[in-house]
Image (spheres, rainbow, N blue to C red):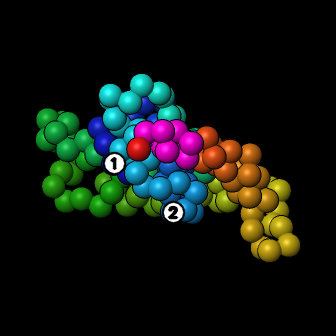
Amino acid sequence: LTGDLFLNGQVCRVVGLFLAIVRNLIDPDIVDCLFDETYPHLVPAPPAPAFGMYANDAAYMSWEGKCKAILTPRPAHRYSEGFNAPHILEAATEWEGQYQETIAKAWMKEGLDEDGKLVSGSRWIQTVLEPWATKANEQLKEYR
């Protein structure tokens, strides 16, 4: 997911909507319904759990040109200043690995069920995604 700016909770809802569509809980036509300004009813997308998401990359290309420095940790040879030194790249990679491990532990906190699925993921599907899909499918029928 890329963009210049996201509203609070917007990424969680985009991911939740995507998961509902790929799990065949709702028809992809729901996207038309969500963005139809003439449809009088609000159909909020279901929020995916936020603890599994983080910003992976940011780009400041115009500012880098103005500052003549690399402003995000990445290998680059365009400017000698900024976040492109090997020790910074190594620290950023290490931090990302630690953060991903923290996210995995959060998902695994409740363990796996007898089918080998994440209990926390299954609970979210049952308590958030499926009830949302039931209501959204009714609204989608009305919309059509």
Which label belongs to residue 22?
2
**Quadrant assignment, res 115:** bottom right
Looking at the rendered image, the disc whose residue lies closer to the viewer, 2 or 1, is 2
Q: Which residue is mark 1?
A: 2
Q: Which mark is residue 32?
A: none
Residue 102: x, y in percent?
A: 67, 54
Q: Please tell me which residue is depicted at 35% across the width and 37% down the height of the picture.
A: 35
Can residue 71 be seen by looking at this rendering? no
> At which x and y percent is residue 36?
34, 35
Instruction: Specify the quadrant that holds the C terminus.
Output: top left
Please report the residue visible at 20 percent of the width from the left and 36 percent of the height from the top: 63
Numbered disc 2: secondary structure: helix
Q: Nearer the viewer, residue 7 or 58?
A: 7
* Horizontal arrangement in the rendering, residue 38 relative to residue 119 (left or right): left
Q: Which residues are magenta?
A: 136-143
Left-right relation of 94 to 131 = left
Q: Position of residue 74 (x, y in %)?
A: 33, 57
Q: Amino acid at mark 2?
A: Val
Circle 1: is it few (<14), some (14-19), or many (20+) Cα within 10 Å?
few
